Image (cartoon, coloured by chain):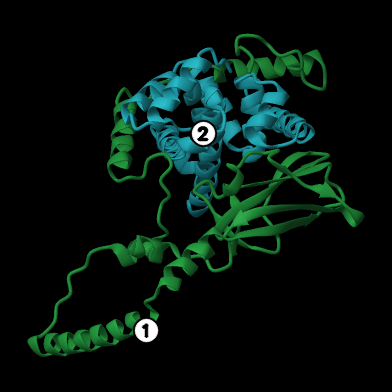
Chain colours: A cyan, B green
């Protein structure tokens, strides 16, 4: 992840803390796209990602005085986004447990026409959704967002060796889940 | 943080090039950017302005739901007879209250409250963790800064620090660095609270503090 505007972030954070709520819009504009992909991949759904990111930004506003290093606002916000996605993931798994999976009904369901690329991405996302949330998070941060393990540790609070194990297990599981898919 | 366009050197899987190629094949489609609805920013800013108007912006502390319930205006409906009875009871309570205030009134009352608020307590924080490499105490009294109050290790892996605190309610936690990284640890022997991110912290209340509600009334 790139934090090119660290000095600017600190100035904007100072303005918001001084009472200029409008200035927070600059931070929303700057970071909304940066974390959207992570949230969508984590939650597997653009609407859930939208909700999670909206809550994350509002929480960040409320707790802005707790941002200990405003020049690294982006990293601090990323932690909040990750936490919000974890909360959404756990809610969704509870919700999914209440739903009955009917393979026949799914086969008969009408789905919009998709290009081969979209079809492939949907297959991979579906496999990703079936991973343990911790493994999914580690895999996305490592191989989709391409962060280093050091950065991942800072953001997630999980030790480097545990993260490496999660990524490795995620890869093994994905290989199994995608065994019949032409990649 | 590094530029996301630069590949990390440890990207290849543990099983070598085959694993790395597999990861590339599944990760590439997932790296496609995603875009939120164009109204996203407006919706966030609308919520932010609502927070600012409600006084819930940065630095404000949300009142617990119980306090919110007591502070919420309510409409009470009553019959004229019950209204008279309530008025009589109110008069009785007012007379009783004025007598109590008279008996408390005096120069030493205000001074003793001020003295109690200003009293400094030296508090000894202890966490037993023989496996820890370092332990820091963070709390509202040190701005939640890691490293502001480091604990010293003693016999049996008991980590200790003594710090002066003013009377009142304080929230705190330990940051324990172990073999598997840093962990946020609430005091196992203290009352705990959870913040909005479900992070658990501990609470200590030091003697003769004026309760928050009373402070608001007397100020």
In this view, the mark in front (2 or 1): 1
Res. B103 mark: 1
- Measured as percent of width and height from the top left, residue B114 is found at 48, 62
- Occupied quadrant, residue B181: top right
Position of B167 with respect to B111 (left or right) is right
Q: Secondary structure at mark 2?
A: helix
Q: Chain of mark 1?
A: B
- Occupied quadrant, residue B194: bottom right
- Measured as percent of width and height from the top left, residue A163 is found at 73, 32
Residue drawn at 40 percent across, 62 percent down: B215
Q: On the same chain: label 2 and label 1?
A: no
* A53 shown above or below A119: below
Using the numbered discs, state the Cα–Cα distance from disc 2 to disc 1 in whole angstroms. 56 Å
Specify the farthest residue to the right: B155
- Measured as percent of width and height from the top left, residue A51 is found at 40, 37
State the quadrant of the C terminus of chain A.
top right
**Crowding near pointer 2: few (<14 within 10 Å), some, many (20+)?**
many
């Amino acid at each position: 992840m790139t934090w090119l505007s660290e000095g600017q972030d600190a100035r904007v954070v100072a303005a918001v803390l001084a009472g200029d709520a409008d200035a927070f819009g600059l931070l929303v504009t700057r970071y909304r796209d940066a974390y959207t992909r992570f949230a969508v991949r984590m939650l597997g759904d653009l609407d859930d990602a939208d909700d999670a990111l909206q809550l994350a930004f509002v929480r960040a506003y409320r707790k802005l005085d707790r941002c200990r290093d405003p020049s690294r606002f982006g990293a601090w916000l990323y932690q909040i986004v990750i936490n919000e996605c974890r909360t959404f993931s756990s809610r969704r798994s509870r919700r999914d447990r209440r739903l009955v999976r009917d393979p026949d009904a799914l086969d008969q369901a009408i789905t919009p026409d998709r290009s081969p690329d979209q079809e492939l991405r949907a297959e991979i996302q579906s496999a990703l959704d079936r991973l343990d949330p911790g493994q999914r998070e580690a895999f996305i941060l490592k191989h989709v967002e391409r962060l280093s393990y050091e950065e991942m540790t800072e953001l997630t609070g999980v030790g480097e060796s545990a993260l490496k194990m999660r990524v490795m297990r995620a890869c093994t599981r994905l290989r199994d889940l995608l065994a019949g898919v032409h990649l | 943080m590094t530029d996301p366009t630069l590949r990390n050197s440890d990207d290849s899987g543990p099983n070598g090039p085959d694993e790395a190629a597999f990861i590339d094949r599944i990760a590439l489609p997932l790296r496609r950017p995603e875009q939120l609805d164009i109204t996203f920013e407006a919706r966030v800013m609308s919520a932010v302005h609502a927070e600012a108007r409600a006084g819930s912006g940065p630095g404000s502390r949300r009142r617990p739901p119980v306090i919110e319930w007591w502070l919420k205006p309510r409409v009470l409906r009553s019959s004229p007879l019950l209204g008279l009875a309530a008025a009589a009871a109110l008069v009785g309570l007012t007379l009783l209250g004025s007598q109590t205030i008279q008996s408390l009134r005096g120069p030493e009352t205000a001074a003793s409250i001020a003295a109690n608020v200003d009293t400094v307590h030296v508090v000894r924080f202890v966490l037993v963790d023989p496996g820890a490499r370092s332990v820091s105490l963070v709390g509202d009294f040190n701005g939640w800064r890691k490293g502001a109050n480091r604990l010293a290790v003693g016999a049996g892996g008991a980590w200790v620090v003594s710090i002066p605190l003013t009377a009142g309610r304080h929230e705190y936690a330990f940051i324990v660095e172990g073999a598997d990284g840093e962990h946020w640890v609430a005091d196992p022997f203290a009352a705990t609270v959870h913040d909005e991110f479900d992070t658990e912290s501990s609470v200590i209340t030091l003697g003769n503090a004026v309760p928050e509600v009373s402070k608001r009334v007397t100020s």
